[in-house]
Amino acid sequence: MESPRSSEDVLALLAWQVELGADEAICDAPIDRYTLPAEAPKRTPRAAALPSAPAAPEPEVDPVAAARMAASAAKDLAGLAAAMEAFDLCPLKRGARSFVFSDGNPVARVMIIGEAPGRDEDRIGRPFVGRAGQLLDRMLAPIQLDRTATDPAHAVYITNVLPWRPPQNRTPEPAEIAMMLPFLEAHIALADPEVLVLMGNTPCQTLLGRSGITRMRGTWTEALGRPVLPMFHPAYLLRNPAAKREAWADLLDLQARLRA
Ligand code: URA
């Protein structure tokens, strides 16, 4: 006959089982799992174990629809900048240091659209301020365009497809572009420029639905009811100085258009 155990014995036995790796008390009697049905019976939770109210499912948010609504409510550029900066559904916002809206003069006849802020733009909070931006300024000067000009005839207004820097300057994802497009469209409508200059493939893909800047550059087309000139991006010109020749031809074409 088994002798009754003292509480010390029981605790010692428990410690021994824990040492062996037992970490859960299951039940008093052993279960022959070979005789159990293949599928475990569904457990019906006891009423007491049920949560008091079922959790409401998270509402699905369509970022493009949300952006459209936020952008359409903006009555002026300041309102648009505020709505865009408050927009939380673009994942790029979390990784960026600055919100980069625009530079130059919004009364300008020419609006230049780039891709997205790079490292310098993210640090400073203004578009095209790094090496590519400095080249852009040097390209515009000979045709008497200047982002600091107050006179609309000589001013330019500058923005990007995206206001937040993509990590490591990677190419923006189509979903990121799609959700920021309503803001860009509103930006163009509110600034109301006479012509748009698209720098490189990303703004061409965004506003014209096609890319291939080597073929497209220098040929006037139309977007949102406005004349559009696709051009090589200044960052491309820094890497391929031989292409500056074509860029110069495009700048002269832009100047002729503005004089016409
Ligand atoms: N490249 C862009 O497209 N935009 C900037 O603002 C800077 C570099």
Image (spheres, grey):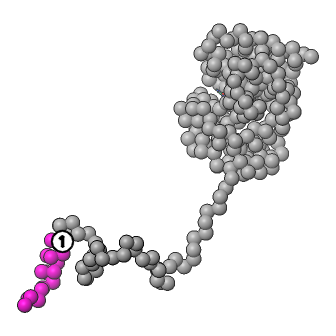
**Residue at point 65%, 42% (across, down):** 175
Quarter of the figure with residue 137: top right
Residue 160: horizontal and vertical position, in percent? 70, 32
Q: 29 and 184: which one is in front?
A: 29
User: Is residue 124 in view?
Assistant: no
Residue 194: horizontal and vertical position, in percent? 87, 27
Note whether 187 is above or below 48 in the view shown. above
In the rendered image, residue 84 lying in the magenta stretch gets the answer no
Q: Quadrant of ligand 1?
A: top right
The quadrant the N terminus occupies is bottom left
User: Is residue 101 in view?
Assistant: yes
Note whether 97 is above or below 217 in the view shown. below
Q: 107 and 59: which one is in front?
A: 59
Left or right: 188 with respect to 100?
right
Disc 1 beta carbon < 8 A from ligand 1? Answer: no
Left or right: 252 with respect to 33?
right
Q: Which residue is mark 1?
A: 17
Note whether 238 is above or below 122 in the view shown. above
In the rendered image, residue 10 lying in the magenta stretch gets the answer yes
**Residue at point 62%, 23% (across, down):** 130
Helix, strand or loop status at disc 1: helix
Q: 20 and 234: which one is in front?
A: 20
The quadrant the C terminus occupies is top right
What segment carries the magenta color? Answer: 1-17
**Residue at point 85%, 26% (across, down):** 227
Q: 143 and 202: which one is in front?
A: 202
**Residue at point 11%, 89% (across, down):** 4
Prevalent SS, magenta region: helix
Residue 239: horizontal and vertical position, in percent? 59, 15
Residue 174: horizontal and vertical position, in percent? 65, 39
Exactly how many numbered labels are in the figure? 1
